[in-house]
Amino acid sequence: MIQAKNSNSIAGLIVFLLAYLIVLGVMASKTGIWLFPAGLVTLAFLLVLVGLRVVNQYEKAVILTLGKYRGTRGPGLTWIFVGIHQMIKIDMRITTIDIPRQETITKDNVTIGINAVLYFKVLRAEDAVLKVENYSYAVSQYALAALRDIVGGVELDTLLTERDRIAQEIKQVVDQETDPWGIDVTAIKMQDIEMPATMKRAMAAQAETEREKRAIIIKAEGEVKAAENLSAAARILGGVPGGLSLRTLGTIDKLQPDPSKTIIFALPVEVMEGIRALVDKAKKE
């Protein structure tokens, strides 16, 4: 495409020069005045005017002279000899490329659909022009191949839990291979990971089972803690005179919350303790 544009420019310039010389010859034959010096000045002015180019702040221009690399120019106003020089502008800003959804088989033989976003920028404009035909397309295709290779080497659980680490691995592989092209891959982000419906149901059932297991464990731990607290409370109440009686009366009071309560006369615990002490003393005697 670039060679075709260059050929068209040269052909257009030759046609323009021939037409201009013909016009000067016709005017000279009619007027009798030789207009060649004035024509040269006008032609030089036109060449300067046509060759002016503007390179934006975020661009660099690669200059080829008759197809041979001559240098790279920065932003600002520049000039090229039209038909001799060829200028190729390269955008130096970060470029975003969407990697379309790909069907990939993980290490544990699960078919998933995954898409990602690639961020890169050009560091050396001359390498991006001279060493690869279409650097944007080449980088996107290499990133797509690296994505499928690396995702195919990990299991589904690892892919879901370590997405950032895997994306970093893909970025390092692509960055290393595209560095000779003057490309710097800044980041690769995996977006959607689509799984089969059967796998989604299986994972949902597994997650529900896991939540039930945690609920049972938490409930058992709570019962153990409650039993320990009850045991400690019983020891404290047993060591305080009348403590068990007060506890018993409090429990009886809570049995019937209705205002018309039934009065229950319970045998004090101290009486039972006294009887038990007399029995033990009689046994000893």
Image: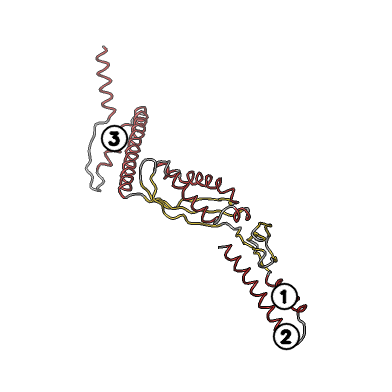
Marks 1 and 2, how far apart at CA: 20 Å
Q: How many marks?
A: 3
Marks 2 and 3, how far apart at CA: 135 Å
**Residue on which disc 2 sits:** 29
Q: Dot 3 lies on which element? A: helix
Residue 260 image offset from top left, x and y in percent: 23, 47
Q: Residues within 10 Å of mark 1 (few under 14, many from 20)?
A: some
Marks 3 and 1, how far apart at CA: 118 Å
Q: Residues within 10 Å of mark 3 (few under 14, many from 20)?
A: some
Q: What amino acid is at disc 1?
A: Leu
Q: Dot 2 lies on which element? A: helix
Q: What amino acid is at disc 3?
A: Thr
| Of 110 and 182, the residue lying toward us | 182
| Of 20 and 109, the residue lying toward us | 20
Q: Given contact means CB atoms under 8 Å apart, are the residues at marks 1 and 2 in contact?
A: no
On the image, which quarter does residue 202 sit in? top left
2 vs 3, front mark: 2
Q: Is residue 14 above or below residue 74?
A: below
| Of 120 and 54, the residue lying toward us | 54
Residue 16 falls left or right of residue 210 = right
**Residue on which disc 3 sits:** 248
Q: Is residue 11 above or below residue 235?
A: below
